[in-house]
Amino acid sequence: MFEPRVMCFFCKWCTYAGADLAGTSRKQYPPNGVAVRVNCSGRVDPQHILWAFREGADGVLLGGCHPGDCHYQDGNYNTMRRLSLLKPMLKELGIDPDRVRLEWISAAEGDKLVRVMNEFVDEIRELGPLTVDLGEKLSGVEAPPEAAAAVAAARQKPAASASKKKTKAKAKAKK
Amino acid sequence: MEHRIGVFVCHCGSNIAGVVDVKRVAEELADYPGVAFSTDYTYMCSDPGQNLVKEAIKEHKLTGVVVSACSPTLHEATFRRAGVGADLNPYMVEIANIREQCSWVHMEDKPRATEKAIKIIKTMIEKVKQDEALDPIAVPVTKRALVVGGGVAGIQAALDIANAGHEVILVEKEASIGGHMAQLSETFPTLDCSQCILTPKMVDAAQHPRIKLMTYCEIEDVAGYVGNFKVKIRKKAAYVNRDVCTGCGLCSEKCPAKTDSEFEEGLAKRKAIYTPFPQAVPNKPVLDAEHCLYMQSGKCGICAKICPVDAVDYEQKDEFVDEEVGAIVVATGYDLYPMINIGEYGGGKIKDVVTSLQFERLLSASGPTSGVVRRPSDGEIPKEVVFLTCVGSRDPEHHKAYCSKICCMYLTKHAMLYKHNQHDGQAYLFYMDVRTGGKGYEEFYQRAAEEDDVLYIRGKVSKLYEEDGKVMVWGVDTLTGQKVEIAADMVVLGLAMVPNAAALELAKKLKIQVNEWGFLSEAHPKLRPVESLAPGFYLAGAAQGPKDIPDAVAQASGAAAKVASLFAEKEYHREPIIAFVDEDDCAGCRVCVSVCPYDAAEFDEERKVAHIQEAICEGCGACIAACPSGSVTQKNLTDDQLFKMVTAALED
């Protein structure tokens, strides 16, 4: 049976604590996802989601506090807005937008975390493995030479290898 | 820089090792790039375990440490201290959570749990590789506390903090402090009169020079962090200017509108303008707009006319007060599980089936029957009274799974006091187990059974129904196996204790954790029972779980001691995991300034770049995700760290 790989980003105040509660309550769910703890779901940049798909994730799960409950006032609304912009873009890249799921799971909702994990893993299993090679797709997106030159000139120091992708994003944004 | 990372895999007894193959994990990670040392141990958090970490840091000259154990909320601080003990910067120590988020949730699939544990640890190794040595940010502490809830726990906490020399704001949502304890008749096992021991404390709290009492107020909003909370308090419109009111009581006396008294649990009436009970603190009325004739129809206005100091003000609106405090004690108390949920016992429709709090009022000398037990339907003195324990408690299939802890004792007290009241009456008490864990409790139970002839029947009652003015009780005595049928005059239900309905809303506002039943979660069930996991919040009383008065008071004093020790320090040290701007990269677009919820991001007009103010930044990361040029980043959680962590989590 196909076992999907799920990348999880959980905010430390609500969903990560909810996942801890699922643990202390010994609630069982499939081990398909690994969670990264971020301070706020609003810390998650769409780049991280794309990167996860590029690195072999079949699904990405974001967990934050319920609307109105964000520890940082409104970080989760930022996430919600960013995701609604990212989803059409995923479609263009040939990735089913359902492969990204945003859930509000509070620190008291261990049960909900278990339910969401089960559902999401089943859904992704239904969708099958992600066959889009995002690395290849994104490498086709080149910044116009003049923009790239302008960015290079603006930067005195050489760009680190990891920020290459960001440079492109920046060039795109400026365009 | 060469990475020399140490990986320490904890067995947590069999909690982790019973599911995850810890030996294999430690061995596999020994070969992971950057790892200089990898080992496993039974209890890493124990003294020998921590020493093992310290020794390894020194011996292998480790630059970073990943302790693979329980959730970072539990022992991150422990291992960071251990790191400091070996001269390693605390922020070079990270926790991989392989218990709560691995071994405990994947017990059925051990091989895959082991795989997942390895992945989790790899993500943390990648994080440590790019962590920098940081120093905590010192912030001043506002030495003022907020106590939410004016029951006995809240009062005790407020008094103890105030006596330690600090200012306290005590907020109570009702018109008087006192909570449920003020409603009780006598208290087990000593049978002291509840009001006699509580009211002096209520008065102390009200008169204490360092306690600011705010009754009929609710918490609207809480912002900030430990040491520096900003609290918005809603002063509910009482329609009485309580600063001017002298508490003469004329208004209540003359008010023509009546409704059920909450304090008397619906067994008596109160006026629309009322003080909840005669010993209320403060002893000043509030007006219940819902039942006031003037507020509803514009006719009446007697109270305003009769008030000698013109304190009645029908135009009064809710007001908001902002306060700054350094610590918050949550003592929001309990409610009884509503009778409507227990259909087999009539769901609250049988008049002579009462709750335990109603029975307290019937027993109370200041109650609606002046301490003579009379049944609600016809005011007759009941001759056969049945007491039922575990109503809604210890019933995971239908109601609450937990034991409400105090029902055995208070029903024993009820039965005993009833017998003292009516010598020729008969008291029956149905029980599942009689739980008498407490000083003097077992002796009290023996006294009820032997000296006061309370008949204890082991078994559950399946049904209550009305017949010929009696409450028919169908049950079973499981010791003899015989069916028991009693035609009772009155039945008292020992309903489950549930968290106060308003407390759950409040917990959401405070962002503190609750358990699956809504009780506030302590930071550690054994070792940190009076603190919340969120720093700066302390727990007291039944809001944290069912408990009796001595336990609630003890916990309140414990919480107060914690507050006092927080206030004993000059400064509180904050996490330095905050955002910073790479000014060379910043294009000055000001997106960060617009998304920052704390106004920590500001724009430097001269240099045309953004700047984050360290003292204000909370480290939420909103600006980082929003920055189009990637020039804002978070200390020890940079974008590059996140990319590497994601890669490690997904690698085979």
Image (tube, coloured by chain):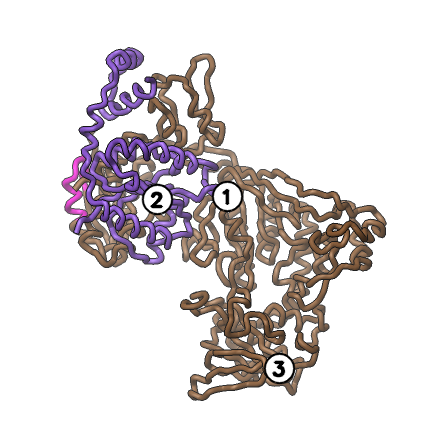
- Point 54% across, 83% down: residue: B449
Which of the marked residues, 2 or 1, is nearer the chain's N terminus? 2
Q: Residues in magenta?
A: B25-37
Image coordinates of residue B154 in percent, x first then y, are: 58, 54
Give the image quarter of residue B28: top left
Give the image quarter of residue A12: top left
Task: Kindly identify which numbered label has been placed on residue B486.
Answer: none
Question: As shown in the figure, which amino acid type bears the numbered disc 3?
Answer: Asp
Label 2 marks a residue whose chain is B
Q: Are marks 2 and 1 on the same chain?
A: yes
- Point 71% across, 52% down: residue: B289
Q: Dot 3 corresponds to which residue?
A: B489
Image coordinates of residue A145 in percent, x first then y, are: 24, 13
Could you tell whether A152 is left or right of B227 in the image?
A: left
Q: Secondary structure at mark 1?
A: helix
**Colour representing chain B:** brown
Image coordinates of residue B76 in percent, x first then y, are: 34, 44
Marks 3 and 1, how far apart in space?
55 Å
**Colour representing chain A:** purple
- The stretch drawn in magenta includes residue B82: no
Q: Quadrant of the N terminus of chain B?
A: top left
- The stretch drawn in magenta includes residue B28: yes
Marks 3 and 2, how far apart in space?
59 Å
Label 1 marks a residue whose chain is B
Q: Secondary structure at mark 3?
A: loop
Q: Are marks 3 and 2 on the same chain?
A: yes
